[in-house]
Image (cartoon, rainbow, N blue to C red):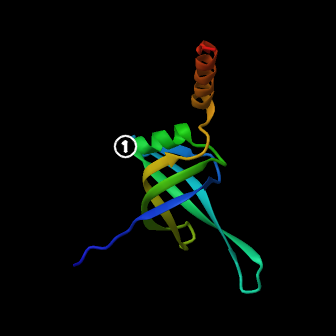
Amino acid sequence: MSRGLNKVMIIGELGRDPEMRYTPNGKPVTSFSVTTSRSWVNAEGERREDAEWFNVVAWGNLAEICKQHLSKGQQVYVEGRLQTRGWEDQNGKKHYRTELVANEMIVLGERRGAEAAEEAQRSETEFENDEFSF
């Protein structure tokens, strides 16, 4: 059997704050949604826009990093693979969900919370301590 390639790379904005939970074995898993957008001009010269939503799942250390550093509206790069899982509800109806299982994440927008405040404070302190030679 030949090998295939299942690799996804997206840049978009978080649609909601990440939600972290733990498996019964204690392994962290974080889920969040990312929207990507594209625009084009159609044959009539009209500008059109479209958005695509991705359900993202991160496991282990990456799950903890995503929960700590990401928030709704933030721009992010996510790389991983697509995985579709299925289940049956109480009424016997089958459901399917396709998710991007992340193996890499890079924050592209501003950092959030304490980390951003700490960075701002550090920059302010460095500015105050600079000596200007005239």
Above or below, 48 against 116 in this view is: below
The quadrant holding residue 128 is top right
Q: In the picture provided, is 19 more to the left or to the right than 64?
A: right
Q: Which residue is mark 1?
A: 25
Residue 32, x across and y down, in percent: 57, 52
Residue 88, x across and y down, in percent: 50, 69
Which image quarter is the N terminus in? bottom left
Amino acid carrying label 1: it is Asn
Spot the residue most to the left. 1
Say which residue appears at 49% left-offset and 47% top-offset: 106
Give the number of callouts: 1
Foreground residue among 91 and 6: 6
Residue 58, x across and y down, in percent: 45, 50
- Residue 65 visible in the snapshot: yes
Say which residue appears at 26% left-offset and 73% top-offset: 3
Say which residue appears at 45% left-offset and 57% top-offset: 79
Say which residue appears at 57% left-offset and 70% top-offset: 91
Above or below, 59 against 39 in this view is: above
Element on which disc 1 rests: loop
Foreground residue among 126 and 55: 126
